[in-house]
Image (cartoon, rainbow, N blue to C red):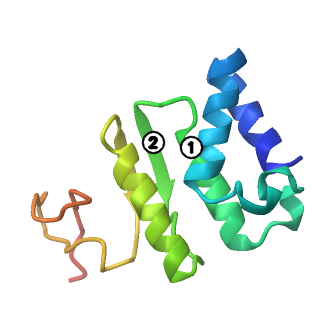
């Protein structure tokens, strides 16, 4: 299946239909930079690891779910793709709760209780004692 076909599949699972489905798929591909060079129409088995990671994020956000779980969504991405991905996540968090794991210390400073000091996340960390 192609990246576009994956998004159509998951969009239908989330009850998107017709023009709304087409628009959601196109927006998803553009938001994670899989629309350039007709990449969205290539077989996913030919995608690099980073492209697969970005497609996974697009799949998780299609259909405007109210809660999204992501496990290390930026692992394996080059710095430019990672920054773009975090911009997508930052934009998506406006309308939903996003629960994710990340070892990227540039995203947040962890504390033993919820913190509002970071612009992107509220972070809860378990101490390493």
Above or below — where is 92 with respect to 105?
Answer: above
Label at residue 60 = 1
Pointer 2 and pointer 1: residues touching (CB < 8 Å)? yes
- Checking the image for residue 124, the label placed there is none
Residue found at x 60% / y 48% = 58
Query: Residue at 52% of width from left, 63% of height from top?
Result: 73
Q: In which quarter of the image is residue 112?
A: bottom left
Where residue 8 sits: x, y (%)? Answer: 75, 33
**Residue 16 seen in this snapshot:** no
Where disc 2 sits, the SS reads: strand
Q: Which of marks 2 and 1 is nearer the N terminus?
A: 1
Residues 63 and 103: in front is: 63
Quick one: quadrant of the C terminus? bottom left
User: Going 24% across and 67% down the picture, which residue do you hit?
Assistant: 125
* 81 lies left or right of 9: left
> How far across and how far down the image is residue 44, in percent?
84, 57
Give the quadrant of residue 18: top right
Instruction: Identify the element where label 1 is drawn.
Output: helix
Please tell me which residue is depicted at 79% across the width and 62% down the height of the picture. Answer: 37
Q: Where is residue 26 in the image (x, y as percent from the top left)?
A: 66, 40
Return the residue at label 2.
68
Q: Whole-Å distance between the Cαs marked 2 and 1?
A: 7 Å
Q: What crowding class fits label 2: few (fewer than 14 Cα within 10 Å), some (14-19), or many (20 or more)?
A: some
Front residue of this view, candidates 103 and 56: 56
Judged left or right of residue 14, residue 8 is right
């Amino acid at each position: 299946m192609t990246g576009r076909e994956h998004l159509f599949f998951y969009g239908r699972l989330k009850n998107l239909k017709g023009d709304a489905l087409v628009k959601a798929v196109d927006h998803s591909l553009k938001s994670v930079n899989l629309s350039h060079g007709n990449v969205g129409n290539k077989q996913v088995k030919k995608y690099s690891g980073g492209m697969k990671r970005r497609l996974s994020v697009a799949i998780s956000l299609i259909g405007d779910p109210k809660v999204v779980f992501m496990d290390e969504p930026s692992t394996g991405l080059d710095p430019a793709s990672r920054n773009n991905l975090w911009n997508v996540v930052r934009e998506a968090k406006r309308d939903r709760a996003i629960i994710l794991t990340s070892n990227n210390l540039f995203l947040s400073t962890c504390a033993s209780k919820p913190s509002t000091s970071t612009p992107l996340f509220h972070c809860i960390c378990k101490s390493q004692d």
